[in-house]
Amino acid sequence: MAAISNRFIVTALTDGQSVTGELVATRSLWQAIDSGGNPIPNWAGEEEGKRPKLYPLLQTGGQVVAPKSVQWKYNNEVISFNPTTHLNTNDSFAGTFKETTYTPSGGVSVPAIIIMKNLASSGGNEDNDTISISGTVSVNDTDLAFEAMQGVRITKAGESDSVGELILVDGHNQLDGDGDSVRIQALLHTSSSNAATGNYTVDWYLNGVKKTTTTGTNDNHIITVTGAEVTDYVVVEARFNVNSTQVATAFIGIDDIGDQDQMQMAYTVYATSGAVPGSIIQNNTTAAVLKPGQSVLYGFWIGKKDDPLDYSTGWSYAIRAYSADNKLVGSPTASEITDVSGDRRIDQPTNNTSFNVGGTTIGNVGTMPISYGQCVNNGGQVSVFVYASK
């Protein structure tokens, strides 16, 4: 069976905007507030090199390229940096971000930022955040604009105060062919001390198919994903178990930039005034931000990397959807989400239909709608993983 997956995020904000592209984070962007009011994981308590880092991954013809200019935003506010310390100087969140550079797969240095402080705080910030980047990239002597966003999930921890996290050990999520590989580490946080005590197990899944189980303490849960296991994009999911009881879930995406067949996406936002067509969304994180009364209709299909509108047939699509606190609210296995109903449940896509992208009709498409109400009733954000198989 061939399998391709992709991910998109839909966030409910009062005055949001829609963005496209890929912004890579070196670790899961999720902080929870435990019963004592402490953020977990405690990013501020870690060494700078271990804190979350974000950088744009831009490709032209399969090659990683550096942007010509960039502008970072936090919750839609432009981030200003001190040219000497490289820390941000915004009054309301000074010192939270530090500008730097990073060299992902492909050997090209790109702008990056490090999250220096905790974003979650009890009685302060208990809402989902967004970090975005916009700018230009020069392609064949033409400047093209790009924009990308990552959502930061901020929730309250459950009764067990357990939060699972995945970290890209090598700092990147890109593979270039079957011979390449990346390492992923799973960490279980049970308090703001950033460490779980005792042994636990992690069940690892690639696109919903179990890969392996690791057992031990926080230092023992590292797996390797190879290019031979990935077609275009794979969702790595970790299910954390203590004494045979699942206490947390975490996921991260791995992208094979060498594959020709890739999942493509487009979306249309609907409002009272009518539809506002979306453009082609290539590769990985596809985010739409909805205002009250709006909904979004996504279309996804398998197209060529160099020509997204050159679609192939014979594919069917399924999804796994999670709420802001990583609760399963949509799954190919209906029995997994029998307790979710009403305006929380995310249903399976409609298969083998068509979708209009910039005046061109794409066939063999899977489509699915998500409403503002569904986002709100799932904690303000819905994360959806799309799987294509044939």
Image (spheres, rainbow, N blue to C red):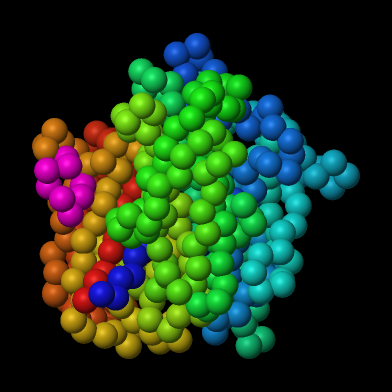
Residue at image location 46% in from the left, 36% down from the top = 164
- Say which quarter of the image contains residue 317: bottom left
Determine the residue located farthest toward the top in the rendered image.
Answer: 36
In-image side of 378 versus 219 (left or right): left
Figure check: 52 above or below 268: above
Residue at image location 40% in from the left, 47% down from the top = 213
The count of marks equals 0
Determine the residue located farthest toward the right in the rendered image.
Answer: 84
- The answer to whether any part of residue 11 appears in the image is no
Figure check: 38 above or below 9: above
Residue at image location 21% in from the left, 76% down from the top = 390
Residue at image location 16% in from the left, 40% down from the top = 337
The one nearer the camera, 70 or 384, is 384
Query: Residue 280: percent from the left, percent from the top?
Result: 38, 73
Query: Residue 6: percent from the left, percent from the top?
Result: 36, 63
Figure check: 201 above or below 108: above
The one nearer the camera, 26 or 154, is 26
- Say which quarter of the image contains residue 61: bottom right
Residue 297: within the magenta? no
Query: Residue 16: percent from the left, percent from the top?
Result: 41, 46
Figure check: 76 above or below 385: above
Q: Which residues are magenta?
A: 330-337
Which quadrant would the N terminus be assigned to in this image? bottom left
- The answer to whether any part of residue 157 appears in the image is yes
The one nearer the camera, 184 or 281, is 184
In-image side of 275 versus 136 (left or right): left
In-image side of 136 versus 337 (left or right): right
Query: Residue 190: percent from the left, percent from the top?
Result: 49, 23
